[in-house]
Every structure is written in C-alpha cells, then in structure tokens.
Image (cartoon, grey):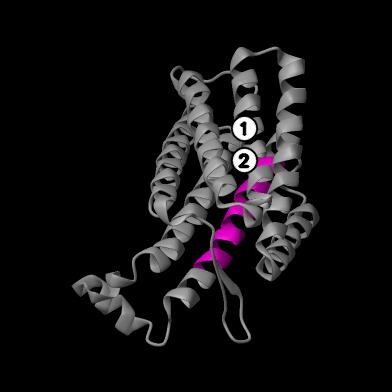
C-alpha cells in the first residue's frame, strides 16, 4: 500500500495488493461501461417520456463515469510508470512537466472524490423527489459536495464514510419506494444499491487489509452489474410509471 505526501498538497493512495494491480482498474472499467449503458437507457427514457428525472439519472451516472475514469488514470500512474516512455505518454508527460506519478494519482483522486460525491448526491435528489427549482436546496447540496470533497482530501476514509451515508439514504429511499409501489424491478434496484452500500463499508477499512480492498472492488462490481439488469428490463419497453 502506498501513501505518499505531496508537499503542501493532498496524499496519493494505492490500496491494491501487487497481485491485484490492474485488475481493480478492469473492474472499474466494467463499472464505467455499466454506467455508460445506464446513461444511454436513461436518456432514451427521457426522450420517450420527457420526464426530467431520467435526464437527471443520466447526469448522475455521467458524473460517476467521470469519477471512475479519474481513479483509473490515477492508479495506472502508479501501476505503470513506464507509460511515460511511450510516445503518447511522453507527450502527456511533457505537457505536465513536474508532475510525478504520485502527484497525478493525488490530483486524479480529488477529481474522483468530487464526481463520485456529485453523482451519488444527484441520485439522492432524484429518489428524494426534492425540487430542482429550489435554488437554495441546490446551492446547499453543491456546498455539501465541495466540503465533502475537501474533507475527503484530508483522509480517504472520510470519503468512503460519506459515500456510505449517501448510499444508505439512497437505498432506504428506494426501499420506501418499493414498499409503496410493490414493483419487482424497484426491488432489484433497491438490492443493487444495497450491494453498493456494502462495498463502501468495506472500502472504509481497506487500510487494515489489502484483501478487504479486493473484496470491496468485487462487491462494488456486483452492485453495478446487478443494477444494470433491472434497468435493461425497465427500459426495454416504453417506460410508464416504473417507479424509479
């Protein structure tokens, strides 16, 4: 596990055991693919129904996609330092002269923190049915995302603790939604977010064991794959009162 400090700046983290290097990036790449598919299905729903909640859902997973992309870039900067010796890598390195792999990792993690928190916060807004027209609510929640990102820079565990709380609220809201409409697909979505909730709980404790990180990544992958299944079923036909 690598913990490096940039002078007067954020830390860089690598949680994976060496034998798992790259596999976590593959898992996160699968999560990106799932998120992109959800973006597509959500936007398709928006075009069919003109309901803004599907557009917001698409935006939330776009943010999550950007968050995972940043994390992949940050970890690969540590996993594959020889990348700077390739023609493309050397060009990038020249464009960012002075950036070490650890500084790239730290900057990428900040971006990861911000977009993941923004994505989960948007999902919370959707399921909570808060009014997007209330500018004060939006400003307050945007402030929360910025503060949570800043706090996460201090220590990564605070980031995962925050995402755990957000996913707890999201999962509970989806559970309440399921109890109201008794929709089988809504139950699948609730379970999927519940699995993601468990993964964030594991991520909080990765500092104590690298195996916990492996388990957290695998559980998170299961959550995203499981989330895709009900949404494919939901968006297969023209959505009407699907209860998402």
Q: How many numbered marks appear? A: 2
The residue at 77%/24% (across/down) is: 176
Q: Does residue 50 appear to the left or right of 179 in the view shown?
A: left
SS at mark 1 in the image: helix
What x and y, as percent, mark residue 106? 53, 71
SS at mark 2 in the image: helix
Q: Are marks 1 and 2 in contact (CB under 8 Å)?
A: yes
The residue at 59%/86% (across/down) is: 7
Q: Nearer the viewer, residue 128 or 110?
A: 110
Decide: few, some or many residues near mark 2? Use Cα within 10 Å; few <14, some 14-19, many ≥20: many
Q: Which mark is residue 199?
A: 2
Q: Which residue is mark 1?
A: 195
The residue at 31%/76% (across/down) is: 92
- Which range is magenta? 108-125
Q: Is residue 124 above or below residue 162?
A: above
Q: Quadrant of residue 6?
A: bottom right
Task: Say whether residue 109 is magenta.
Answer: yes
> Distance between the Cα atoms at labels 1 and 2?
6 Å
What x and y, as percent, mark residue 17? 48, 54
Q: Nearer the viewer, residue 214 or 141?
A: 214
Q: Which mark is residue 73?
A: none
């Amino acid at each position: 596990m690598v913990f490096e400090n940039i002078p007067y700046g954020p830390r860089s983290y690598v949680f994976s055991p060496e034998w798992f290097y790259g596999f976590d990036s593959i898992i996160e790449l699968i999560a990106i693919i799932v998120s992109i598919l959800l973006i597509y299905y959500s936007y398709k729903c928006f075009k069919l129904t003109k309901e803004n909640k599907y557009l917001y859902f698409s935006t939330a997973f776009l943010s999550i996609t950007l968050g995972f992309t940043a994390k992949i870039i940050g970890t690969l900067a540590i996993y594959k330092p020889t990348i700077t010796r390739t023609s493309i890598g050397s060009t990038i390195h020249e464009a960012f002269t002075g950036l070490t792999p650890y500084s790239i990792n730290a900057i990428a993690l900040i971006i990861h923190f911000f977009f993941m928190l923004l994505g989960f916060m948007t999902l919370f807004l959707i399921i909570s049915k808060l009014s997007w027209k209330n500018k004060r609510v939006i400003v307050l929640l945007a402030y929360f995302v910025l503060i949570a990102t800043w706090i996460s820079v201090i220590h990564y565990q605070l980031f995962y603790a925050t995402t755990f709380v957000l996913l707890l609220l999201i999962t509970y809201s989806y559970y309440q939604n399921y109890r109201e409409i008794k929709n089988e697909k809504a139950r699948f979505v609730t379970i999927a977010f519940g699995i993601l909730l468990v993964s964030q709980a594991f991520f909080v404790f990765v500092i104590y064991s690298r195996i916990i990180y492996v388990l957290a990544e695998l559980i998170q992958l299961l959550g995203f794959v499981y989330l895709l299944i009900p949404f494919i079923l939901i968006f297969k036909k023209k959505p009407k009162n699907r209860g998402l």
